[in-house]
Amino acid sequence: MIEFYERLKNDFNEFLENQKKKYPEDELLKIDLHCHDYNSDVPDELLGRILNVPETWLKTDALVNELDGNKCDVITITNHNNTRSCYELLEKGRDVLTGAEFSCFVPDYNIGIHVLAYGFNHKQESVLNKLRKNIYQFQEYTCRENIPTIWAHPLYHYTSNGVPPFDFFRKLVLLFERFEVINGQRDTWQNMMVKAWLEKTDKKTLDSYAAEFEIDIFRYCRNPYLKVFAGGSDSHIGLFAGVTGSYLHVPRLKERLRAEKGSDLALEALRNGRIIPFGSVNNSEKLTIALLDYVFQIAMNYKDPGLIRLLLHKGTTRDKIISLIASNGFSEVQRHKTTMHFIKLFHDCLMGVSPSFAKKLMVPRIYKPIFRDAIEMAETNRSRKEDIVQIYHKSIIQINEKLNKILFSRLNKKLTVYFNENKGYNANINTLLSGFELPSVIRAYIEPEKPDITDLNNIDFRKLFDGLPFPFFALSLILSATYASSRAMYNTRPLLSLFAKETGNYVHPERVLWLSDTFDDNNGVSM
């Protein structure tokens, strides 16, 4: 297993080194071709739409500051299906390459994909939004109008039917010249699988696909045999914007910049396919950090979407139950001052803003080590940018461990007191849990009966839970982000395994975990 990831790391770094040799360093423009701000306000994920939350609350100026801080020469903002942020910056006099990430639909496979497009005007944007419901019409139009497109994160798609057939990818590779080989939110295995796949699609292979699917490849691409590698951070929180991206080659760059805009030169390079991706090795760390900040931002900005909206919105019963639980969870978090104080401080520290001395003094003594880990992230953001992912991830793990320790230490003490106080009633954990039962009859909530006054059935849950909300809520948010990150990563495993088999590259080692239960003692599972 270690050898597999070491090989990925070495091959990735070798790939980047070889890419750098393609063009002279002094003729390269640095750009992040895939980043978002608050104008990405309608998420593709159903849960986000039900809860009526945007993909990010990041202000345009904050994103631009991060891109400038990472020394990007040209700015573009690729919000979902709109260029509002680009035009807002243009109106302020900033040189910007217009761009957007379009949610496109592949009708013959019933699958959604994302396509990055650049250099179009308002009129063309309107047409693109109409055509994105059919990827073939969309790509035919962009080819005719000479609008360069990039298939974003090609192995991440939107479908309810499991893993797409490999024919889906064989057909769509004919529609694009440019591919996002390095996506800053995806793990290195996924990125390297895209590279390995594209390197296998030579002219002979593409011609055979075109014949099989009866496609005129020149209808969708101006240079159909050119398969170009690109990179973008896919940043939604601003933190990693410009850390992953692309270098665009422009011959005689310094001379031409005297008379031409950087955005025009960038567009020319994109059209000509003169692109070099850059980035770093990544597993799930960046995605975990991004999702954690997103969850914290929801907690800071959440507003009740309304029960009627939740019930009538498109989605399964399971989706709506999860949404209802999440909505109540965020509402409860917002009621707890210590948790909200931590969330706001954590978010600020992620962005490199340290809390004031007064705020540090207000932190209860038992929580100071947790807040100290968060503050360390702010210091890293300012002074050690190159180590930011590893230190952030380490800090989150440490915070998680300390919250766990506080939560279960307090819970253990409270349960010990409860059991000691109720020895005469043979109190145990099952008795305690039975106290959580909720009536199934609605009238019980309107006209509740008088409670049973015996000690066992009259548990003071307010007293029992006192001191637990902060570690519990904070842990729940951290674990939910970690779970979502792991789920996104491991959900692609079947598809990555399919690609590994088809390309003969990066086949993941197989492991077996043997679980067995010892006989006749009812003590659970042993390994």
Image (spheres, rainbow, N blue to C red):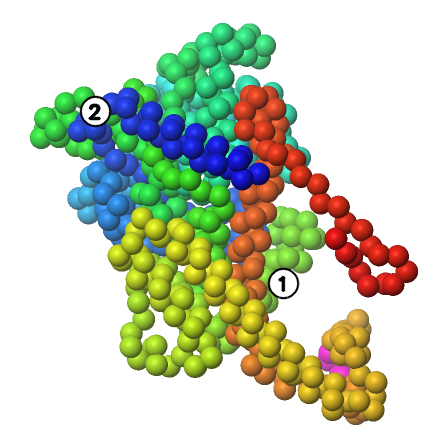
Q: Earlier in the sequence, mark 2 or mark 1?
A: 2
- Rate crowding at label 1 as few (under 14), some (14 to 19) or many (20 or more) other CA atoms within 10 Å: few
Q: Which residues are magenta?
A: 443-448
User: Could you say which disc has been placed on residue 463 in the image?
Assistant: none
Q: Quadrant of residue 323?
A: bottom right
Question: Residue 5's spot in the image, x, y percent?
Answer: 51, 37
Disc 1 target residue: 325
- Across and down, in percent, residue 122 comes to 32, 35
Look at the magenta stretch and give its main secondary structure: helix
Q: As rendered, which of 382 and 462 lies closer to the eye? A: 382
The N terminus lies in quadrant: top right
- Going by the image, does 446 lie left or right of 77? right
Residue kind at label 2, given as amino acid type = Pro
Give the number of the disc on residue 24.
Answer: 2
List x then y, in percent, for residue 164.
Answer: 62, 29
Identify whether 119 is placed above or below 46.
above
Q: Is residue 447 magenta?
A: yes
Q: Determine whether the residue tagged by mark 1 lies in a helix, strand or loop.
A: helix
